[in-house]
């Protein structure tokens, strides 16, 4: 059948069925099935009546519908940024649990931090008829999703905001978290504090850098350019950044690591050095408790849960302007962030 | 259109197209498109001819095909066991990279260690027309996949074997790895060695237990029932197991942890105790190097890569009996497994 527009106001779990189409067209269920499945044996006039009912009701025959007919579930899609980043594990699992509680299946894929792949994946999930989409964006222009959103695909952005479209968004307070972490180092006597972060085009990386600069300014500390290093989280790049900040005539006495990938490498690099350098990392890491690493923790599960709950409220028919929810972070002092300057 | 059987010998990238159908039926492309999409304007006779060509060629109109027509990619599915287990991160990413190299999209989902959810998810991915499926099984009966496999969905099992069907399988040598790890503890003088593992219905857990028993027997050591604890990897359960083995009149002097989830809890539990207990854990863990944890490492990325490469060889037309590939593990001594008995 032709792809019919999905009514933007369709209600989840209350979609028109083939039975509804049959009733409206005044034909039997088998006839609707024939038309929908393109089987022969239907007169052109009957076919037209069925097609009109389909259009009028906004019925869509799709894989989900076929799955539903077998007594199975609808689905929502999650576009991740990196399948191997442990930060996304609890986030994904939380989304999955909410989806499960709503009787829906979760399908994931990863953009590998490539805007083109993000678009390809998001549209491929839509082509596979997900009812809703949660996106951790790699790109900064999401206008490509507008036709899908108009067609009724509920969409929520998480971890990073949508670009150039209005959409529900759930973020952690990256700015406030980084600001608090750097203020913590200042409070322990540090004046020369380095910041090693991810590529600045990534929203969270830019926000954390902004938080660092704000905390330094709050303390009346000018930031030396040599104290800031932004780029890929590749271990080699991060190791070099640590080495060069510690090799300055007046080396930094503390480091703020912009995310968990950076922190892991910084911890390894500092472990091999005699002089104690203070460290606060953004994101908690497994076993950081045993290693005494002070962190600014995001609640990754809460991010996923909040985004998924928003998505299902939309699917349940919530009509209101897109909202931006920002979740607080928390500082967990474990030793590395409380070292005095040496 | 009616769902046509997929020819089991179809070749990936060489599928019949609507053009092929048009040529065989002796009609124009638009006519095929009308039939396939259930649009009106086709005489019953023409429709029959097109349907016959569709059946004869094994053409299937599906979401992938629609995606391909837009210049996008085919897809393979990956059924994971737990979205939050870091072990599956590198495995998933390796599968994704191979899929990407073959121009295919990867779609994931998780069974959450529930055989019913595994089945639901695997079939839902098939309903969404993945070309192939990589499964980390939660269940032990995969006959439900037989119709899909007959219909041409290439299927490879990884990490754990398929149950009650013949299928390509890629595993780590859990038995050999555990045996080597326990032998390592024996070589460092331990005689009372505990084993804390996952639920024994999980293939890898059972194999690792078998490896433990073999190493103990190799060393002529009888295993006390109180030294073996199997069950969920829930931290509370694992903590209790550690506590009870260390509270025995003759406590164990070493522990073998059956997987990364168990190891993390054992490490935390041992960190709070004065007496040094030796530990070897199955699976490497991030930052285990800094904590001096001796492990039996699996190459999770190689598991994923090997499974994905096998899948694409099948999709490229490989015809041979299902094979079972077993990848070696490696012992990484870092201190905890080299402690002497106390």
Image: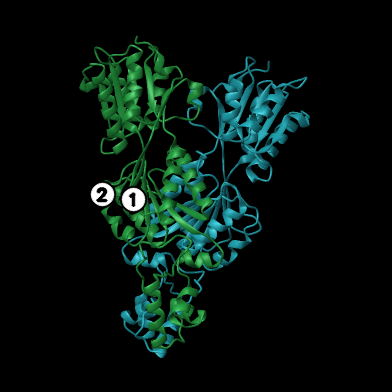
Chain colours: A green, B cyan
Res B1 seen here = no
Categorize mark 2 by other alpha carbons within 10 Å: few (<14), some (14-19), many (20+): some
Q: Share a chain, discs 2 and 1?
A: yes
Return the x and y of residue A68 as percentages of the image width and height: 52, 64
For the N terminus of chain A, the quadrant is: bottom left
Q: With respect to residue A336, does A282 lie above or below?
A: below
Marks counted in the figure total 2
Report x, y in % for residue A263.
39, 27
- Decide if residue B237 is on the left or right side of residue A84: right
* Callout 1 crowding tier (Cα within 10 Å): few <14, some 14–19, many ≥20: many
Q: What residue is drawn where x is 46% and y is 30%?
A: A285
Q: From the viewer's perspective, tell me whether residue B181 is left or right of residue A37.
A: right
Which residue is depicted at the point 40% across and 15% down?
A338
Asked which secondary structure carries label 1, the reply is helix
Marks 2, 1: nearer the viewer = 2
Quadrant in which residue A264 is drawn: top left
Q: Tag on residue A141?
A: 2
Q: Left or right: where does residue B131 sit relative to residue B217? A: left
Displayed quadrant of residue A72? bottom right
Q: Please name whichever residue, B171 or A104, is drawn nearer the observer in this view of the structure.
A: A104
Q: Name the residue under label 1.
A: A118
């Amino acid at each position: 059948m032709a792809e019919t527009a999905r009514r933007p106001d369709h209600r989840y779990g209350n979609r028109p069925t083939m039975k509804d189409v049959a009733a409206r067209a005044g034909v039997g269920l088998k006839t609707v099935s024939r038309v929908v499945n393109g089987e022969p044996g239907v007169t052109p006039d009957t076919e037209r009546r069925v097609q009109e009912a389909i259009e009028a009701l906004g019925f869509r025959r799709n894989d989900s519908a076929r799955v539903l007919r077998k007594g199975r579930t609808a689905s929502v899609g999650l576009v991740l940024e990196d399948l191997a980043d442990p930060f996304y594990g609890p986030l994904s699992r939380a989304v999955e649990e909410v989806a499960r509680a709503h009787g829906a299946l979760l399908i994931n894929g990863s953009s590998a931090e490539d805007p083109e792949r993000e678009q390809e994946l998001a549209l491929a999930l839509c082509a596979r008829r997900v009812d809703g989409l949660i996106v951790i964006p790699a790109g900064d222009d999401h206008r490509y999703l507008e036709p899908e959103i108009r067609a009724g695909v509920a969409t929520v952005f998480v971890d990073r905001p949508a670009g150039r479209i209005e959409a529900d968004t759930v973020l952690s307070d990256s700015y406030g978290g980084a600001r608090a972490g750097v203020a913590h180092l200042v409070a322990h006597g540090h004046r020369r504090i380095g910041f090693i972060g991810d590529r600045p085009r990534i929203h969270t990386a830019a926000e954390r850098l902004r938080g660092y600069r704000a905390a330094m300014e709050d303390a009346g500390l000018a930031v030396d350019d040599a104290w800031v290093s932004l780029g890929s989280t590749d271990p080699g790049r991060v190791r070099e950044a640590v080495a060069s900040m510690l090799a300055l005539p007046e080396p930094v006495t503390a480091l703020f690591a912009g995310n968990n990938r950076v922190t892991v490498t910084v911890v390894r690099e500092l472990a091999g050095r005699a002089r104690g350098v203070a460290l606060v990392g953004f994101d908690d890491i497994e076993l950081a408790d045993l290693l005494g690493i002070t962190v600014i923790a995001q609640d990754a599960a809460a991010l996923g849960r909040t985004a998924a709950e928003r998505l299902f409220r939309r699917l349940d028919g919530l009509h209101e302007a897109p909202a931006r929810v920002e979740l607080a972070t928390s500082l967990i002092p474990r030793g590395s962030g409380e070292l005095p300057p040496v």
